Image: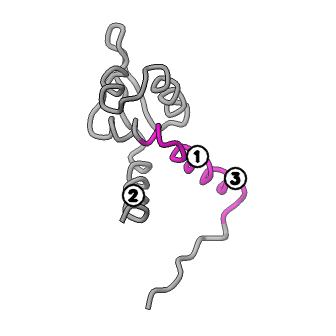
């Protein structure tokens, strides 16, 4: 028989805030699409747009939020910026959540 999962209730209020912020990052499907587009290799905004079908302004806005949250980093080559995922734990969380929600 399966038992109910438990949550560590000994967290401090700032820990709950951190947890909520991690889930806020994942709460927007556009950001999930962008993460999926760059999870295996870095890409520039045009490549991300091509892979996701999203427009450049929208992708740029969400990449900025992901950068501020410490999820992605970018490097500049000439006029292009190449983005890559640096928070691999967040990718693992996405993978686990996908198995729970989709399956």
Give the distance between the C-alpha atoms of the residues marked 3 and 2, in whole angstroms: 26 Å
**Labelled pair 3, 2 in contact (Cβ < 8 Å):** no
Q: Which residues are magenta?
A: 11-32
User: Which quadrant does the N terminus fall into?
Assistant: bottom left
Going by the image, does 13 lie left or right of 40? right
Q: For residue 99: magenta? A: no
Residue 68: percent from left, percent from top: 55, 31
Q: Residue furthest front?
A: 53
Q: Residue furthest top?
A: 78
The correct choice, above or below, for 10 with respect to 73 in the image is below
The correct choice, above or below, for 44 with respect to 13 in the image is above
The circle drawn on residue 14 is 3
- 76 or 29: which is nearer to us? 29
Give the distance between the C-alpha atoms of the residues marked 3 and 1, in whole angstroms: 15 Å
User: Circle 1 is placed at which residue position?
Assistant: 24
Going from N to C along the chain, the mark reached first, 3 or 1, is: 3
Label 2 sits on a secondary structure element that is helix
> Badge 3: few (under 14), some or many (20 or more) residues near its Cα, within 10 Å?
few
The correct choice, above or below, for 41 with respect to 45 in the image is below
The circle drawn on residue 51 is none
Q: Residue furthest bottom?
A: 1
Residue 11: percent from left, percent from top: 66, 64
User: Circle 2 is placed at which residue position?
Assistant: 98
Residue 31: percent from left, percent from top: 47, 38
Going by the image, does 17 lie left or right of 62? right
| Point 39% across, 58% down: residue | 98
């Amino acid at each position: 028989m399966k038992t109910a999962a438990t949550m560590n209730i000994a967290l401090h209020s700032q820990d709950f805030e951190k947890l909520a912020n991690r889930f806020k990052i994942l709460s927007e499907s556009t950001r999930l699409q962008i993460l999926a587009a760059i999870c295996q290799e870095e890409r520039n905004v045009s490549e991300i747009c091509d892979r996701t079908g999203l427009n450049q302004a929208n992708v740029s806005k969400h990449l900025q939020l992901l950068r501020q949250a410490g999820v992605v980093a970018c490097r500049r080559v000439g006029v292009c910026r190449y983005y890559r995922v640096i928070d691999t734990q967040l990718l693992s969380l996405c993978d686990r959540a996908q198995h729970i929600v989709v399956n």
